[in-house]
Image (cartoon, rainbow, N blue to C red):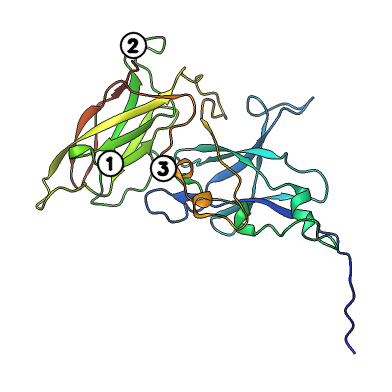
């Protein structure tokens, strides 16, 4: 005779957050080689590798995923700052402030009787889009521009605008794409469509570029750190998650980060359809 017996089981760890970075251009997983971690405060008596504290790595999970777990005791705080960067510079780094489902909320579903509803794994999933960086492998025949966003005058002289964002518009103000810049102001803008132009499409096309940048300017980069990289807050997913929990303007990188100001005027540049060509500095000024 089979007898059902209730057995208490110690859960050694629970999933706090899973991160699966996506290539913003292809929507496919961004692939191996990325670094994903959460930033913790300074540890008294310990030499810090980066200003302000440590970056504790997530665990790798398969070829393109990363996970943060609640251990049996201790673990991350209720809200973590997640940093994603690519040593190979194929993608521009990003940083997110993410509220977690608490250990108590996750454990409540395992209690006897349950004290909380089950929290689905996909409600603990972050799907950030990463924009192409300077070393992104550009397919042949792609249309785009390489340029630097810089200041015209002021305390920074004509130096780079760190972590700029750029929107591209075609004839009639049709959005054509967007790009993120790195700590050196370097931008790789790739265009997959040329809007609603009638056929045949011209070989050269004028587009308007609109810059967004932090105001005031972030501090210069330090070795081993990413100062000034904007921190973008995301809302905690519901369980089950809604479509907007897993795909929204913040995750896509189209939302302007807090403290960013839009440039005073758009700048026109010329694309050569089917080629990625260098362009002069894009000057960022504010009114």
Q: Please tell me the numbered disc located at residue 28.
A: none
Disc 2 from disc 3: Cα separation: 28 Å
Q: Secondary structure at mark 3?
A: loop
Q: Nearer the viewer, mark 3 or mark 1?
A: 1
Could you say which quadrant of the image residue 95 lies in?
top right
Disc 1 from disc 2: Cα separation: 29 Å
**First-in-chain label (2 vs 3):** 3
The residue under label 3 is 131
Task: Look at the numbered discs 3 and 1 and tell me whether their residues touch, using CB distance below 8 Å.
Answer: no
Whether residue 193 is visible, yes or no, is yes
**Mark 1 residue crowding within 10 angstroms, few (<14) / some (14–19) / many (20+):** some
Could you say which quadrant of the image residue 233 lies in?
top right
Q: Is residue 43 left or right of residue 2?
A: left
The residue under label 2 is 153
Q: Nearer the viewer, mark 1 or mark 2?
A: 1
**Mark 3 residue crowding within 10 angstroms, few (<14) / some (14–19) / many (20+):** many
Total number of numbered labels?
3
**First-in-chain label (3 vs 1):** 3
Whether residue 13 is visible, yes or no, is no
Pick the quarter of the image with the N terminus.
Answer: bottom right
Disc 3 from disc 1: Cα separation: 16 Å
The residue under label 1 is 175
Q: Provide residue 275's location: percent of width, then percent of height.
A: 21, 45
Pick the quarter of the image with the C terminus.
Answer: top left
Q: Is residue 15 left or right of residue 202?
A: right
Q: Provide residue 119's location: percent of width, then percent of height.
A: 68, 57
Q: Provide residue 234's location: percent of width, then percent of height.
A: 56, 40
Q: Is residue 240 left or right of residue 274?
A: right
**First-in-chain label (1 vs 2):** 2
Could you say which quadrant of the image residue 76 lies in?
top right
């Amino acid at each position: 005779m089979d007898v059902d017996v209730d057995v208490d089981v110690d859960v050694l760890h629970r999933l706090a957050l899973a991160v699966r970075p996506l290539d913003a251009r292809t929507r496919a997983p961004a692939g191996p080689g990325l670094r994903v971690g959460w930033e913790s405060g300074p540890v008294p008596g310990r030499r810090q590798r980066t200003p302000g504290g440590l970056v504790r790595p997530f665990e790798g999970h398969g070829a393109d995923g990363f996970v943060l777990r609640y251990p049996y005791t201790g673990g991350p705080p209720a809200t973590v700052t997640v940093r994603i960067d690519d040593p190979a510079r194929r993608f521009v780094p990003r940083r997110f402030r993410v509220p977690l489902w608490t250990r108590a909320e996750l454990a409540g579903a395992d209690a006897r009787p349950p004290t909380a509803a089950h929290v689905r794994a996909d409600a603990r999933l972050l799907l950030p889009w990463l924009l192409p960086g300077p070393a992104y492998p550009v397919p042949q025949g792609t249309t785009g521009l390489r340029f630097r966003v810089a200041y015209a005058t002021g305390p920074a002289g004509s130096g780079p605008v760190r972590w700029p964002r750029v929107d591209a518009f075609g004839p009639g103000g049709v959005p054509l794409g967007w790009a993120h810049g790195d700590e050196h102001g370097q931008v790789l803008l790739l265009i997959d469509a040329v809007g609603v132009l009638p056929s045949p499409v011209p070989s050269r096309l004028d587009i308007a570029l609109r810059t967004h940048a932090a105001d005031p300017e972030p501090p210069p980069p330090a070795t081993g750190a990413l100062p000034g990289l904007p921190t973008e807050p995301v809302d905690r997913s519901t369980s089950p998650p809604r479509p907007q929990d897993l795909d929204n303007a913040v995750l896509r990188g189209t939302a302007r980060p807090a403290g960013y100001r839009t440039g005073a005027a758009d700048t026109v540049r010329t694309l050569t359809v089917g080629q990625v060509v260098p362009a002069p500095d894009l000057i960022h000024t504010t009114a």
